[in-house]
Image (spheres, rainbow, N blue to C red):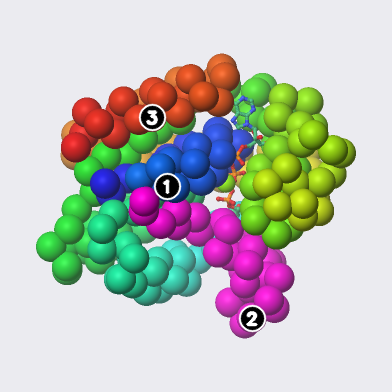
């Protein structure tokens, strides 16, 4: 199973990908998570990326493509993968196509999570993330059993720097301008499957399973 999860910030890509990657036995390759790890480790990549991330802007395509090429060519991705938050521009989509074609692979499906803007704002400004295992919570709609403590690993929860209302609005604008054109791009390749991203998390997971089964 080689799938890409596409959707605006807060659409639930990470929430669904984390569980489904485990279920399908494939790696969950989230560019945002990789970049945040690099920021925490203060690597040159992380320090360069942070400037863009804090503004809600995209990190340059060549940086992202280099990072993902290496990751997609690693052994564990040979049996399949879920890419989450990548590709995010037409240039990244074209590069992904080339990287996969170089090893005789191609995407099976691109799953689009459809969520209204009001709901995205509500989700992002209330999101909390585990520092240790990256599990995602929401202060009102998916709270942990104990405030600010991860149910899965006991790690401390934090609010992402880019989840302030001003930066969220900027990220939504950047999505509309630079990423939304991918909908037509993948529709043209007959790879796009749209899933309603609002409602109970389990119900959405089942809709994604079904979309993936249809593509297989
Ligand atoms: P990234 O980390 O990818 O952020 P994003 O795309 O903005 O998406 P999010 O992670 O915010 O949303 P999500 O869809 O994963 O939602 P989640 O499941 O957490 O990127 C961050 C930055 O890195 C970018 O701005 C950019 O600078 C850089 N970057 C990353 N990739 C890049 C690339 N390819 N090119 C260039 N730059 C790149 O859910 C959100 C909230 O909603 C949570 O609180 C969750 O609990 C809740 N929730 C989920 N599902 C439901 C539901 N069904 N009902 C109610 N609440 C729900
Ligand atoms: Mg995410
Ligand atoms: Zn945790």
Which is more foreground, mark 2 or mark 1?
A: 1
Q: Main secondary structure of the magenta part?
A: helix
Mark 2 and mark 3 lie on one chain; the one further toward the N terminus is 2
> Furthest-right residue in view?
147
Confirm if mark 3 falls within 8 A of ligand 1: no
Which is more foreground, mark 2 or mark 3?
A: 3
- Residue position for label 2: 43
Q: Which residues are magenta?
A: 25-54
Task: Judge the density around disc 1: few (<14), some (14-19), many (≥20) Cα neighbours within 10 Å.
Answer: some
Residue ID at (76%, 32%): 143
Task: Judge the density around disc 3: few (<14), some (14-19), many (≥20) Cα neighbours within 10 Å.
Answer: many
State the image coordinates of residue 15 (x, y, percent, origin top left): 56, 39
Q: Quadrant of ligand 1?
A: top right
Which numbered marker is on residue 21? 1
Task: Please name whichever residue, 168 or 151, is drawn nearer the observer in this view of the structure.
Answer: 151
> Furthest-top residue in view?
199
Which numbered marker is on residue 208? 3
Task: Please name whichever residue, 56 or 131, is drawn nearer the observer in this view of the structure.
Answer: 131
């Amino acid at each position: 199973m080689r799938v890409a999860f596409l959707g605006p910030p807060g659409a639930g890509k990470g929430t669904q990908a984390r569980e489904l990657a485990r279920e399908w036995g494939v790696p969950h390759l989230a560019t945002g998570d990789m970049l945040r790890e690099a920021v925490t480790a203060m690597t040159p990549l992380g320090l360069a990326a942070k400037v863009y991330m804090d503004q809600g802007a995209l990190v340059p395509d060549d940086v992202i493509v280099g990072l993902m090429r290496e990751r997609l060519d690693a052994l564990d991705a040979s049996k399949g993968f879920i890419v989450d938050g990548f590709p995010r521009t037409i240039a990244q989509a074209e590069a992904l196509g080339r990287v996969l074609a170089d090893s005789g692979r191609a995407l099976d499906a691109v799953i689009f999570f459809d969520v209204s803007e009001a709901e995205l704002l509500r989700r992002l400004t209330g999101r909390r993330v585990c520092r240790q295992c990256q599990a995602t919570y929401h202060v009102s709609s998916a709270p942990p059993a104990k405030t600010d403590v991860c149910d899965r690993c006991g790690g401390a929860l934090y609010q992402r720097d880019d989840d302030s209302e001003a930066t969220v609005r900027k990220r939504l604008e950047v999505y509309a301008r630079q990423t939304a054109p991918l909908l037509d791009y993948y529709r043209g390749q007959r790879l796009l499957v749209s899933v309603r991203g609002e409602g109970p998390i389990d119900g959405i997971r089942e809709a994604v399973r079904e979309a993936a089964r249809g593509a297989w």
